Amino acid sequence: MNQKMFFKKERDARVKYLIYIIALIFAIILLVIVNRYKCKYISEAKSLGNEMKNIRRAKNMEKNLGKMPTWDLSDLYSSINDPKINEDLKKIESQINDFQKYKGKITKLNGRDLYNAIIKYEQISELMTKLSCYAYLKYSENLSLDENIKFHQKITETLTHLSSNLIFFSLEINKISNSRIKTLYAESKSLKVYKPVIDKIRLFKDHQLNENLEKLMLDKSVASRNAWSRLFDETMDNMEFDYNGKKLNQSQILELMNSKDENVRRETSKIFGETLGKNGKLFAFITNTLAEDKEVDDKWRNFKTPISEMNLSNEIDDQVVESLRETVKKNYINTAHRYYAWKAKMLGKQKLHYYDRNAPLPFDDDEIYSWQDAEDIVLSAYSDFSPAMANIGKEFFDKNWIDVPTRPGKTGGAYAMQTTPSAHPYILLNYQGKSRDVMTIAHELGHGIHQTLSAKQGLLMSGASLTLSETASVFGEQLAFQKILAQEQDTEKKKAILARKIEDMINTVVRQIAFLDFETVVHNERKNGEIPLERLNQIWLQVQKESLGDENFIFDDEYKNYWMYIPHFIHSPFYVYSYAFGDCLVNSLYEIYKKNPKGFEQKYISLLEAGSSKNYIELLKPFNLNPKDPRFWQEGLDVLNNMIDQLEALN
């Protein structure tokens, strides 16, 4: 995960997908489908002594990493010209036309007939999801190909238009009285299986509009929010950074920004920030436009705060998220501030420059892992915990469900995309051989395994809520980290491995809560009018200084622009806290596993298999964990604090 879970573009448009809008109230399901912005690591840099060494290593990188697979999308369609695509579009149109027979009659259906209606709705949604996901997979495969861009846009527009005729379904379900719903469940045991779906729809009862307005919102999404999100994506992915006479893409320059050579770090970081700044007015305009768009939407839908819709989708109380935020912020000093003070000493500095934040430590040997080595490490780590999960993970490698190498035009970062229960997930990586890239594989494979296990729930209940969507991925990282740490005998190398893990955890928890603060201030201030570029830069610096420690860092002028390339701000407002939630949760789960491994594997697999058929409180009950208890968050953060203690003790 590049900058790991931070710029997780995890990685989603997240919800840029048309199906998110389609199933408007099934947002949870579709948000997970577009996991893409969920996990974006900034990989560690090449080990450079000088520019000539840099060039030689770049030429030999692919050779050193070995043969890396690209994905095979033929389980969905053979190509963008596959005749089955038009056949499926016609089939969707026919099914939707047939589905219109339920319009105006949902409140009058008996239990069995409502169950049949949901089954038909799910079948339509699955076929639409298959097309939507394939279009996006092709799009992210190469954003420089006009044919991929046009195909993605065509599918998005076509499905958006078709799906407007499904809006009545969730609206009419919300017109059924509570007493009538209970009667329907009594009439049909089959219908009761879909109670989580119906409950999810009814959560939004007070926030839905009339059918005509919902259709208008959906029809305009392609030319409004989705269009601005697309502009952001294509601007970022096609941006070039001039370094030493070469034009680098985002993935290439991000790698160099973490070089062992401080001169390379400084120069590339400055170029990155300055290039972002040249596009600052555009990014500020996109940010302001989308924040205003959300405010209008929230006003019409009667959401009290900008974060309320996300929390409702996650079925999580506002105060639980606020408790998470407050607990993490109280720990800033003992986590991020303390670690970066230690790192400054290791680098022989009184203060770190911002570009030193992810710099390799002097005793870090910058080991390169071939693709085969990375595969062996990750699968072995999963196998040590659960052979069943390892067997699922192995399929991704054996059947080319992973797209691995970096290449021109390919979207940066990494993601796991849940397609449909009748197919399987796909994983996109930009593998460059660093230990963090190995962690990225473990992370995204965790998503893929989770999505595979939950497929048995069917499309409408296979996607985990965002509160649990990062559980399997972060747990997978923990397994890989423990595997690498256990294999290493050298104290200095162990220290380097431990430090990298601590940095990843800080990025996952502290940085994400800082991002949440940035979003909160931006969306609140946007209510009073357009926010100038200078103010956006100021807000960014404010939250960064607070979270990382102003006393630990020198923030050069160009760093003020770094908020501009974080996709979650654009694609999925307020999603970022799910990473902090997931990391604290996984810390607690792993501690339980260490203390009493007997029976843990099956309970954990059952949690993953459940998808969204149960809420997070129910799913965590077998582990005696309750995120509503403020102590839950501190216990998760104590794991990070203890790791820093352990690191300091190794000196």
Image (cartoon, rainbow, N blue to C red):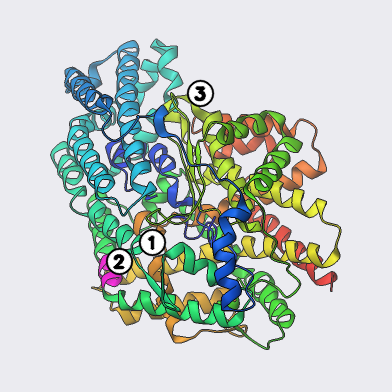
* Residue 531 picture location, percent across and down: 28, 75
Label 2, label 3: how many angstroms apart (C-alpha)? 38 Å
Q: Mark 1 points at which residue?
A: 569
In the figure, 73 relative to 573: above or below? above
Whether residue 283 is in magenta: the answer is yes
Q: Mark 2 points at which residue?
A: 287
Nearest the viewer among 359 and 64 is 64
Label 2, label 1: how many angstroms apart (C-alpha)? 8 Å
User: Which element carries disc 1, helix, strand or loop?
Assistant: helix
- Whether residue 330 sits left or right of residue 555 in the image: it is right
Which image quarter: residue 118?
Answer: top left
- Whether residue 443 sits left or right of residue 310 in the image: it is right
Q: Is there any visible trace of residue 204 in the rendered image?
A: yes
* Residue 393 picture location, percent across and down: 61, 34
- Main SS category, magenta section: helix
Which range of residues does the magenta coloring cover?
A: 282-288
Residue 535's tag is: none
The earlier-in-sequence mark between 1 and 3 is 3
